[in-house]
Image (spheres, rainbow, N blue to C red):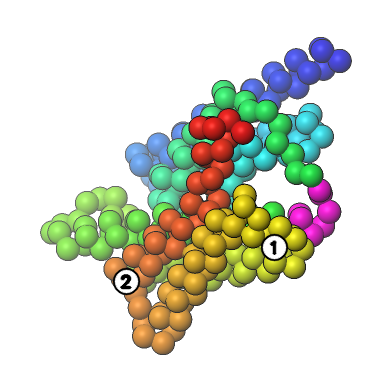
Amino acid sequence: MITADISTLMNTTILATIAICAYLSSAVMIIRPLPQDKSRRAALACAWGAVALHVSYTALLVYQNAGFNFSFFSTASLISMIVALLLLLAILSKPVENLGIFLFPVTALMLALELFFPEKQRSLDTHNWQMNTHILSSIIAFSLLNIAAVQAILLAIQNQQLKSHPPKRFIQSMPPLQSMESLLFQMIGAGLFFLSIALASGFIFLEDLFAQHLAHKTFLSIVARLIFSGLLIGRSRYGWRGRTAIKWTLLGFMFLLLAYFGSKLVMELILHR
């Protein structure tokens, strides 16, 4: 039994270490392109390999612990993995691999923190389909809106740099503003859809949604949903874009970030509860 545990630990450590290196290598290849346009293929191959290894690492841990560990770093690692996967899927239809410069190192960091700072097992009391629906839709919503927030930051940088003459090489390599904004609103729309499912399933299936330990999460999530809904309505009726869209996106994501990780950070890492 001890030998099996040591073997599993070694396997997970190896998988995580290679995945971290692959994430970082992909980001470096995007920043410093290779000659003859080989960098894009190599960078994406590294990124897909990193995600595959990350998935394998997570699956091994779930098998070892007989369930997923919903501790702070484990949850952050899972969400960052889903964000990386969603970005790679988006790249299949839009040339937005430059987002990986920011997202892949963050994913590597979250995976490293989970690997080197293991936390005690924090499983859920119930694993019925209602709870799984709520959790899965929450994670997908946060992942999609995470990409939207990074997209908004890049849009802000792109807007500023395009005013300079000439803009920097990195900005010139990015897709046109129209394509970037189109992806931004697609991510917001999809994220809002899953956030609505998460809130609806919470209200229907969780009896203590406004209990003391969940009230602030529920309130902040509702505020975030209202902000993103207002942005999409403003986009449809008044043609909001540019700086207005960027500000609303980042504001909504800030509330969502506080809802998902604010209390978890305080309770688990500061108060150790």
Eyeballing the image, is 231 above or below 150? below
Q: Are dots 2 and 1 in contact, CB under 8 Å?
A: no
Quarter-of-image position of residue 64? top right
Q: Can residue 123 be spotted in the picture? A: yes
Eyeballing the image, is 259 above or below 230? above
Q: Which mark is residue 183?
A: none
Seen at 70% across and 66% down, the residue is 203
Q: Residue furthest front?
A: 212
Q: Residue furthest right?
A: 1
Q: Residues within 10 Å of mark 1 (few under 14, many from 20)?
A: many
Identified by mark 1, the residue type is: Gly
Element under disc 1: helix
Which residue was labeled with disc 2?
244
Quarter-of-image position of residue 227? bottom left
> Which marked residue is nearer to the observer: mark 2 or mark 1?
1
x%, y% of residue 132?
76, 54
Labels 2 and 1: the sequence-earlier one:
1
Task: Identify which residue, 273 or 61, lies in the foreground.
Answer: 273
Task: Identify which residue, 117 or 40, lies in the foreground.
Answer: 117
Residue 12 in the figure: left or right of residue 272? right
x%, y% of residue 263?
54, 45
x%, y% of residue 120?
67, 28
x%, y% of residue 231?
43, 74
Q: Can residue 16 be spotted in the picture? A: no
The C terminus: image quadrant:
top right
Identified by mark 2, the residue type is: Thr
Q: Which mark is residue 202?
A: 1
Q: Which residues are magenta?
A: 126-132
Magenta stretch contains residue 75: no
Task: Identify which residue, 123 or 147, lies in the foreground.
Answer: 123
Q: Residue furthest top?
A: 3
